[in-house]
Amino acid sequence: MNDLDLRTLGNARDEFDRALAAGVPAVPLRGRSVTVIVPDLTRPCPTDAVEAVVEHLREARLRILVGLGLHRPMTATELASLEAIAAPRGLELAQHDPDLVAPNASLHPWLLDADAVFAVGVVEPHQYAGYSGGTKALTIGCGSRAAIDRLHGLELLRDPTVRIGRREGNAFREALRRGASAAAPSWGLQMVRSSDGWRAWAGPLESTWGRAAQAAARASFRTTPQMDWMLLPVPPDKSASFYQALRAASYVALTERPAIRAGGWLIVEATCPEGLGRGSGERAFASALARGRNALARELYGEAPAPKPQGGTQRAYVLELTLARAKVGIAGAKPEPLLEKLGLRFFANRSEAIAAVRGTGSGTIWDDVFSTVPVADSSVHE
C-alpha cells in the first residue's frame, strides 16, 4: 500500500471522515457483509482513507480486497500498512487474482457474495477511462483475466471517445459500468489530490465518482505554450517499471491539444527497478514490444491481424502512438534493450538528458504529469 506523507496534504483524515459522515449511512450496512476494495501500490491512496472507511463501517462484516487487476501481487512489506488495519480488527485481507475468478463469472467472488461493495479510490487522469476510480476498481481491479483482456482490446483503443480526461460518452467508461453491474450494490470514497491536500466524496459509487471526476477535471489539466522538450519526473508510486512510468509520456502526447510539438522530446525521469515490470500485464507488454514498431503500427491501424486481446498489450500500442508524436527518452534507469530497439534513448540522469535536448528549442520540467496534465493553449493549430 502506498502510504503518502499526510503531513504534506493537510488534515486528510478529517476530510475523509467528513465525506463518509455526509454520504454513507452506516446504519443500513450494520451487520451486513461488505467487501472494501482498495488500490494497489500503483495508485497514491493514503492508508488513512482505508482506516476511515473501516472505522465508519465498523458494525458491518468487513473484508479488504486489494484490486490488483493484472499487476503483480504486493509484497509483505508493501502490505504492512493494510495488515496493521486488518489484523487488530480480525478482518480478512486478500489480493485479487484474476485467474481464480470462476469460469462463468467476470468478477472476484467477494464482489458477488457480499451485501455491498465499497471502493476506495483516487480519481486522476487515466488514458482510457478518462479518470481513474469508480467502477474501474471493480471491473478491472477485481475482474477475470478474460474480462480484463476484452476491455484492453484494439476495438476500444481505436474508439475516438476513449481518451484521457473524457468523463461522458467514453466507450471504455461505459464498458466498465456494464462489467460492474453483476456486483453487489456499490458505495465509494473517492478522492482527488491537489497541491494543498485531499478533497473527498462518499456515497453511491457512480454518482460519487462523477462528483470527484468533475473536480478532477478542473484540477488536472493546465494550459501551457507548446514545448520542444519536456522532462517528466515520475512520482515513486508510478516509477517501479517502464510499464507504469512510460504513461507519463503518453499522457502528454495523446491529449487533444498536445503540449509537446510534433517531433519534440519527452524525457521520462524514473528509475524503473523492475524493468518492464513483473506482473502478467507487464509480461504481455514486453511480448508485444518484441514484435517491433512496424508490426504494432500495422496491427493498430488494421493493416495486419492483431493477436488475441491480452491485458497489458494495450500499453505497447499506446507507446507506438506516443512515438508517432514525439521522441521519447528515459533518464535515470538501466537501459532496456527492447525499448532501445523501438528508438527510445536512455540517459544516465536528468542533467545528461537536459544537456542533450536543450538545444532543440524551448522546454520545461513538468512535475507529476499524473496529477496535472499539460495541454497546449487553444491558439495552437497543428
Image (spheres, rainbow, N blue to C red):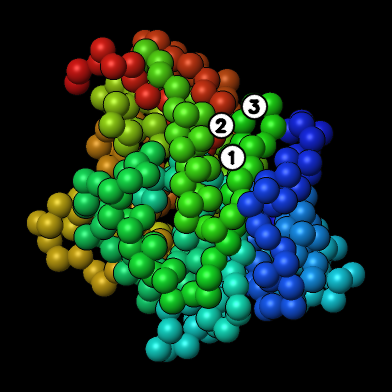
Q: Residue at x 41, y 29 (%)?
A: 266
Q: Identify the disc placed on residue 195.
A: 3
- Distance from disc 3 to disc 2, alpha carbons, whole Å, reads 11 Å
Quick check: can you spot residue 7?
yes
Judged from the image, the secondary structure of the residue bearing numbered disc 3 is loop
Q: Quadrant of residue 145?
A: bottom left
Q: Residue lying at the far right in this picture: please name it.
A: 88
Q: Nearer the viewer, mark 1 or mark 3?
A: 1
Residue at numbered disc 1: 192
Instruction: Please provide percent x and percent y for residue 377.
Output: 33, 16
Residue 119 vertical position relative to residue 336 in the rendered view, above or below: below
Residue toward you, 367 or 121? 121
Mark 3–mark 2 CB contact (< 8 Å): no
What amino acid is at disc 2? Asp
Residue toward you, 173 or 66? 173
- Distance from disc 1 to disc 2, alpha carbons, whole Å, reads 14 Å
What amino acid is at disc 1? Val
- Tell whether 59 sits left or right of 144: right
Q: Nearer the viewer, mark 3 or mark 2?
A: 3
Q: Quadrant of residue 308?
A: bottom left
Quadrant for the C terminus in the image: top left
Give the mark nearer the N terminus: 1 vs 2: 1
- Distance from disc 1 to disc 3, alpha carbons, whole Å, reads 10 Å
What amino acid is at disc 3? Ser
Residue 245 vertical position relative to residue 327 in the rendered view, above or below: below
Residue 59 vertical position relative to residue 242 in the rendered view, above or below: below
Residue at numbered disc 2: 368
Instruction: Please provide percent x and percent y for residue 229.
Output: 40, 20
Q: Residue at x 18, y 58 (%)?
A: 299
Q: Residue at x 21, y 52 (%)?
A: 158
Mark 1–mark 3 CB contact (< 8 Å): no
